[in-house]
Image (tube, grey):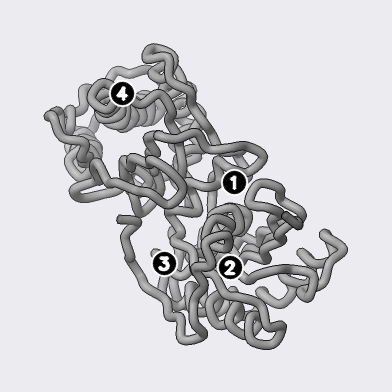
Amino acid sequence: MKDINILSIETSCDETSIAIVKNGVEVVALTILTQMDTHANFGGVVPEIASRMHSENITMVLEETLQKANMRVEDCDAIAVTYSPGLLGSLLVGIEFAKVLSYVYEKPLIKVNHLVGHIYANKIDNHLKFPCLALIVSGGHTELIKMTGDYEFEKLGETQDDAIGEAFDKVARVLGLTYPGGPNVERLALNGQNTYKLPTMLNDDTYNFSYSGLKSSVINLVNNERQRGNEIRKEDLACSFQIAAVDELKRKLELALKNNNIKNVILAGGVSANKYLRKEIADLCAKYEASLDLPEFIYCTDNAAMIGAAAFPLFLKGEFADLDLNAESNSKIC
């Protein structure tokens, strides 16, 4: 079979990214233009600003990607784009741009779920091993998925309230840390000790998660200590929170490893860049003699390469989208 090059577009939040991915595993070229510095001024992503910046930058990002690859759009076999979940305005910029390229250059259009993209980031320069357990950890999602093959998903559990990434960001804010909060909490925790007693979340026999109570406990603890005139040991609180948050993931993943007789694990999503999380999950997998696939750090956060990797199985199956494709703010994997 000849090589298949897919031009992929990701604009679900505040990164404008375009990539060309060969055969679903090799990144020919990747460009990521982040808006982080702009949104840091507001303490978080402002949807209206994000979509406007995508519109201003997406053509430039395409030109840079094609220049890196020394290719033209005509050289690509399909156009892939994130259609959900994400910020509607941001998604629409990428979708409309993809539809124009598909129409003008007569290339098939492939729609990709953003979360599936995070899973398939593990396929870049690699091969997924099935069956596997995929643990998705991001700012908006915390899910445990069982996969028996390409695009064969069974949801085992999900967060019942907040996602782990959202909890990290809220804790960062109450500790006075700047946006993005998650990496700053991780850095602070490196110099801390697990001295604050925080609650255990959903300690049950389900595969579901909960982070609202943990987040609220940290906020209440900080407020109470300040009212008493006590100093908050920020490093220790960051460390205690991070350990409690990751322990929730470990408990549920361990339960799934015990009950499903599966020996392959995938970690996916923006929070998978957390080094403490990666070590703890690696240790857990070693305990159960399970393999662990971790995305390279550049593919942990939002990027178009993961969209190209996830689009390849759909290309092979001929699952193409029509030009009336629209954005969906929160579609599910399964």
Q: Which residue is mark 4?
A: 261
Q: Nearer the viewer, residue 162 or 43?
A: 162
Residue at the image position 32 percent from the left and 45 percent from the top: 142
Q: Nearer the viewer, residue 216 or 212?
A: 212
Residue 189: x %, y % from top left: 44, 27
Residue 279: x %, y % from top left: 47, 22
Q: Find the residue positioned furthest to the front.
A: 1
Query: Quick check: can you spot residue 232?
Result: no
Q: Secondary structure at mark 4?
A: loop
Q: Which residue is mark 2?
A: 80
Q: Which residue is mark 3?
A: 84
Q: Secondary structure at mark 2?
A: strand
Q: Which is nearer the N-term, disc 1 or disc 3? A: 3
Q: Nearer the viewer, mark 2 or mark 3?
A: 2
Marks 1 and 2, how far apart in space? 17 Å
Q: Find the residue positioned furthest to the right.
A: 70
Query: Quick check: can you spot residue 174?
Result: yes
Q: Which is nearer the N-term, disc 3 or disc 4? A: 3
Q: Nearer the viewer, mark 1 or mark 2?
A: 2
Residue 24: x %, y % from top left: 63, 51
Marks 2 and 3, how far apart in space? 12 Å
Residue at the image position 65 percent from the left and 46 percent from the top: 25
Q: Nearer the viewer, mark 1 or mark 4?
A: 4
Answer left or right for 45 relative to 216: right
